[in-house]
Image (cartoon, helix red, strand yellow):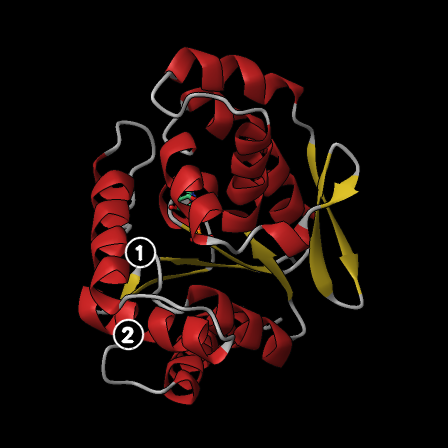
Amino acid sequence: MIYNIAIDGPAGAGKSTIARRVARELSFVYVDTGAMYRAMALYLLRREVNREAPDEIAGACQDAEISIEYRDGEQVVLLNGENVNPYLRTEEVGNMASVSSANPEVRKKLLDLQRKLAGTMNVVMDGRDIGTTILPNADVKIYLTASAHTRAKRRYLELTEKGTACDLSQIQKDIEERDQRDMNREISPLKKAEDAVLVDSSDMSIDQVVKSILQIYRDKVVKSEKESGQ
Ligand code: DC
């Protein structure tokens, strides 16, 4: 029996931290789909593709082969064979990913890879459209969110801790713009699946969020296994 947990939500809601922890607790594999979109965005930035030109994006993305490997339990994203993990977490790449991920050709290229991963192993997969489009039959669906201000503050602290100079109000503006784009695009917009559980982490610690998701998983999956005598 293969189990899938889908975690969707807006930028900065803490999805990757939470999903990684939940996966570790359950010995599942963590699949970060945002990193795949970021790798595609990196490719487009390197090729200096015009982000305002959907046709250029659709054409250029055909030459980018994205694949995934796991090294020491960590997801490594390969872009045409190169490990691009070190280049994915910049604001420039994140903003480009938010634009290019609205392109149907980009989404088509990554959909199969994501479904295949979830079909072969127990995964906690995070993204924007996992519960709605990629894994509509996921065993557990979580919609993880927090206020834009909370998300901006978390990002600001993360960057300043790394020694990166940044401006809180600019970060909040970027986050709000990304929310707008991710929620209003035509294809696979970010939205809560009807059967997803809403978790608002604005006033919750990471531990509390992880605990509540594990509880949701146990309530749903472990109970139904007991009932069916597995
Ligand atoms: O989660 P993230 O910040 O790494 O995602 C980067 C961008 O990729 C985000 O703005 C929207 C897009 N994305 C998406 O469209 N679908 C997903 N499943 C994951 C990410």
Amino acid type at circle 2 is: Lys
Check the picture and name the quadrant holding the N terminus.
bottom right
Q: Is 98 above or below relative to 9?
A: above
In this picture, residue 71 sits left or right of residue 193: right
Percent coordinates x, y for residue 41 in the rendering? 51, 36
Q: Which disc, if any, is residue 86?
A: none
The x and y percentages for residue 139 are 47, 59
Tell me if 192 is positioned left or right of 6 in this view.
Answer: left
Q: Which residue is mark 2?
A: 153
Above or below 164: residue 1: above
Of the image marks 2 and 1, the number of the one nearer the N terminus? 1
User: For mark 1, what is the residue?
Assistant: 10
Of residues 228 and 40, the one nearer the viewer is 40
Name the amino acid, label 1.
Answer: Pro
Picture residue at 49% right of the left edge, 49% below the top: 34
Vertical order, 69 against 161 (above or below): above
Residue at 38%, 78% in the rendered image: 157
- Residue 227: where, in percent of width, then height? 49, 73
